[in-house]
Amino acid sequence: MSDASEEEFEVPQLYKRHVFACFTQRPPTHPRGSCGANGAQPLWDRLGKLVEADGSGEIGFTAAGCMGFCSAGPLMVVYPEGIWYRPTTPEDVDEIYSSHLKGGKRVDRLVMILTR
Ligand code: FES
């Protein structure tokens, strides 16, 4: 007899891919830096418009707070893969959108490798 609490079950996912983008803005002279101070806002505006225009409902886009690696920003994470990206240009955002978010293919040149 199996214990019902140990049975495997599949949790339905709301999105095919879900982006969390850091919107934290600190003053430019703050010692920790910030994604905002590193130019995140126009990039996230662009990505948000792409996701909205897509209209499929398969891609989630969430404004996140600080993710702890501030001076490395602008930072965003794509789930379910858990890939951290550091886009710096509108073209980078476009490539992450078309290749990874829509096509499922990671953009290796923009992956942010984080180590503890
Ligand atoms: S401000 Fe973006 S990770 Fe801390």
Image (cartoon, helix red, strand yellow):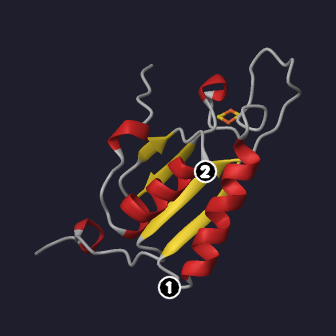
The residue indicated by pointer 2 is: 90
Quarter of image, res 13: bottom left
Residue at 77 percent of width and 41 percent of height: 24
Where on the image, by quarter, is ligand 1? top right
Q: In the rendered structure, which amino acid carries the disc numbered 2?
A: Pro
C-alpha distance separating marks 1 and 2: 22 Å
Q: What secondary structure is marked by label 2?
A: helix
Q: Which of marks 1 and 2 is in front?
A: 2
Residue 65 left/right relative to 26: left
Q: Which mark is residue 18?
A: none
Q: What secondary structure is marked by label 1?
A: loop
Residue furthest to the top in view is 31
Residue 116 left/right relative to 88: left
Q: In the rendered structure, which amino acid carries the disc numbered 1?
A: Ser
Residue at 67 percent of width and 60 percent of height: 46
The residue indicated by pointer 1 is: 56
The answer to whether residue 99 is above or below residue 32 is below
